[in-house]
């Protein structure tokens, strides 16, 4: 799951595992590499959702230092990316072009941005750390009480990933209420920050193309859900048929 749980003096300390930190660094490096020859806007558009998603997922278990260390690592990658983009320019020129206090609410001259549009890259450390008031002297990792803890923690993190699609996806665990199968073709529902991010993105596209739609689910719990368009249509047809049959029923027999 990407978390380390350790106990110190009866307190539970939870940190993203070293493997999770290594994975995000490797991913950032690969993304930046794949953006060779692109422009700053392409870099920002690609990386901002990744940064936002990862930071939101780990905000409850990570220290500021871990976020800052990843920012620093990414900065080095982007600096090299910029140098490669302008082999004939000086380091000063490159730094002046891509790094500035683009985010006016941050007193940081080293924010990566696009000078023409003013859009800039987020930093992991801008995401506020949320401290959980959790001291569990006796809990062990496979304690069922912790299942609840993880589940509620994940719910909170994902609600903050933003957007109605993301929060519906989270509530439905990736399932269509019409047929009970996954909304997208996949082996399993989204299980990691990266998968949540991918699912949200694909579902947003699916909503636009109306292969997935928002529908009211009837029954005890009348709320809007993400549904397969086919399942939605089938449900509507069934309701209409039932209604027609009820209307047709001769009086006196009802
Ligand atoms: Zn369905």
Image: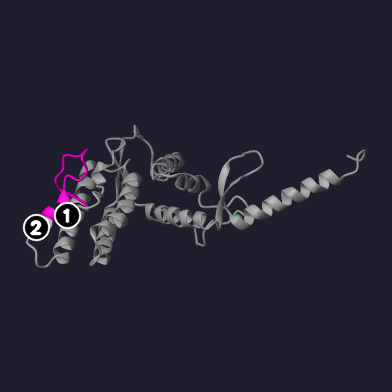
Percent position of residue 214, x then y: 56, 48
Confirm or deny contact between disc 2 and disc 1 (CB under 8 A).
no
Residue at position x 37%, y 36% in the image: 138
The answer to whether the beta carbon of the residue marked 2 is less than 8 Å from any atom of ligand 1 is no
- As helix, strand or loop, the secondary structure at mark 1 comes to helix
The residue under the point 62% across, 44% down is 217
Name the one closer to the observer, 115 or 104: 115
Relative vertical location of residue 216 with respect to residue 135 in this rendering, above or below? below
Query: Which numbered marker is on residue 93?
Result: 2
Q: Which image quadrant is residue 211 in?
A: bottom right
Q: Secondary structure at mark 2?
A: helix
Residue density around tag 1, few if under 14, some if 14–19, many if 20 or more, within 10 Å: some
Residue at left offset 34%, top offset 32%: 133
Circle 2 Cα neighbour tier, 10 Å, few/some/many (<14 / 14–19 / ≥20): few
- Looking at the picture, the colour scheme in use is one colour
Q: Is residue 83 left or right of residue 207?
A: left
Report the disc number at residue 35: none
In magenta, the rendered stretch is 96-113
| First in sequence: mark 2 vs mark 1 | 2
Tell me the residue at 45%/47% (across/down): 166
Mark 1 lies within 8 Å of ligand 1 (Cβ measured): no
| Position of residue 189 measured from the top left corner of the image (x, y, whole percent) | 49, 55
- Total labels drawn: 2
Residue 213 location, x and y as percent?
A: 56, 52
The disc label shown at residue 98, or none: 1
* Residue 104 in magenta stretch: yes
Find residue 67 and report its horizontal and vertical position in percent. 24, 46
In the image, residue 190 lies in the stretch drawn in magenta = no
Q: Residue furthest front?
A: 116
């Amino acid at each position: 799951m990407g978390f380390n749980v350790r106990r110190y003096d009866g307190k539970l300390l939870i940190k993203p595992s070293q493997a999770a930190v290594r994975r995000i660094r490797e991913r950032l490096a690969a993304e930046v590499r794949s953006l060779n020859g692109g422009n700053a806007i392409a870099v920002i558009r690609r990386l901002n959702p990744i940064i936002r998603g990862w930071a939101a997922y780990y905000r409850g278990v990570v220290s500021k230092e871990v976020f800052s260390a990843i920012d620093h690592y990414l900065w080095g990658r982007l600096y090299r990316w910029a140098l490669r983009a302008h082999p004939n320019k000086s380091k000063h020129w490159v730094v002046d072009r891509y790094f500035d206090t683009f985010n006016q609410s941050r007193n940081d001259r080293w924010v990566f941005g696009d000078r023409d549009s003013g859009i800039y890259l987020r930093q992991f450390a801008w995401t506020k750390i949320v401290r959980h008031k959790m001291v569990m002297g006796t809990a062990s990792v496979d304690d069922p009480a912790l299942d609840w803890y993880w589940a509620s923690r994940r719910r909170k993190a994902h609600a903050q990933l933003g957007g109605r699609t993301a929060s519906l996806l989270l509530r439905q665990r990736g399932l269509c209420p019409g047929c009970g199968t996954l909304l997208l073709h996949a082996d399993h529902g989204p299980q990691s920050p990266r998968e949540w991010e991918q699912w949200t993105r694909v579902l947003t596209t699916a909503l636009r193309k109306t292969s997935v739609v928002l529908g009211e689910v009837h029954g005890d719990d009348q709320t809007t859900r993400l549904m397969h368009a086919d399942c939605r249509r089938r449900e509507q047809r069934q309701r209409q048929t039932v209604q027609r049959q009820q209307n047709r029923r001769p009086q006196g027999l009802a």
